[in-house]
Image (spheres, rainbow, N blue to C red):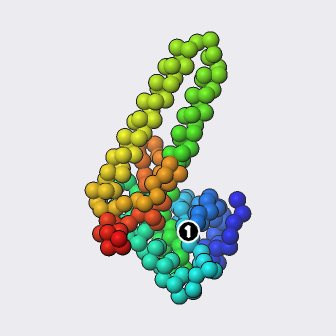
């Protein structure tokens, strides 16, 4: 996926960063940290031309640092989040550990598609369809419980995600990790803003 221009420092790698997503606030790339055997996520917050340059620089710096502090706090408290590897708040970028896996949205989509396939393959055997439906429901409920546990841990350490969607949760085998931490805030900060 071709994408926007990154600062030169971030493009002088082999292989070059691969654009994964363009969000409203950040562009997300897969790249590597120090060696090609250490994949990572690069979040880059480009400047917004509609903002005054001074305000834009301050907001970008504040948001990058807030996200990094929140991730470090969560990791220190035992919440399964990606670690912060490097950042340059003034340039608007941060590197995080790569989590091998997919999003919760992708997993739910695969389960839904598989369920449809089974139902189409066994139209004369409604019992098989019901058994698959039950297995799928049990898997979804188990996944929701695990996600609830992770969100509960976030709240226990005083963090509110703020944009908790199926696209913002990465699933890796055996555990659930929270991604998209740039929208997470500590409770004390969000209460001050109210």
Left or right of residue 185, residue 172 in this image: right
Tell me the residue at 42%/69% (across/down): 68
- State the image coordinates of residue 146 (x, y, percent, origin top left): 38, 42
Task: Name the secondary structure under disc 1.
Answer: loop
Viewer-side residue, 186 vs 99? 186
| Residue 9 appears in view | no
In the image, residue 31 above or below residue 175? below
x and y, in percent, of residue 13 in the image: 63, 69
Above or below: residue 155 compared with residue 27: above
Which residue bears the numbered disc 1?
Answer: 25
Is residue 40 visible in the rendered structure shown here? yes
Q: Residue at x 35, y 71 (%)?
A: 194
Q: Quadrant of residue 142?
A: top left
Residue found at the very far bottom of the displayed protein: 54
Farthest residue in the right direction? 2
Q: Residues within 10 Å of mark 1 (few under 14, many from 20)?
A: some
Residue at 53% in and 41% down: 107
Q: Quadrant of residue 143?
A: top left
């Amino acid at each position: 996926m071709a994408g926007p221009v990154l600062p030169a420092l971030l493009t002088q790698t082999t292989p070059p960063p691969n654009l994964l997503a363009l969000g409203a606030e950040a562009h997300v790339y897969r790249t590597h940290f120090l060696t090609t055997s250490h994949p990572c996520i690069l979040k880059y917050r480009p400047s917004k031309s509609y903002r005054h340059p001074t305000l834009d620089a301050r907001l970008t710096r504040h948001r990058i640092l807030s996200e990094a502090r929140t991730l470090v706090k969560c990791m220190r408290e035992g919440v399964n989040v990606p670690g912060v590897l490097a950042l340059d708040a003034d340039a608007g970028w941060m590197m995080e550990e790569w989590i091998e896996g997919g999003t919760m949205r992708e997993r739910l989509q695969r389960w839904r598609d598989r369920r449809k396939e089974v139902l189409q393959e066994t139209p004369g055997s409604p019992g098989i369809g019901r058994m698959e439906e039950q297995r799928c429901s049990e898997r979804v409920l188990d996944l929701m419980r695990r996600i609830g546990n992770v969100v509960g841990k976030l709240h226990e350490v005083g963090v509110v995600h703020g944009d908790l969607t199926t696209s913002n949760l990465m699933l890796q085998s055996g555990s659930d990790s929270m991604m998209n931490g740039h929208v997470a805030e500590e409770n004390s900060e969000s209460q001050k803003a109210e």
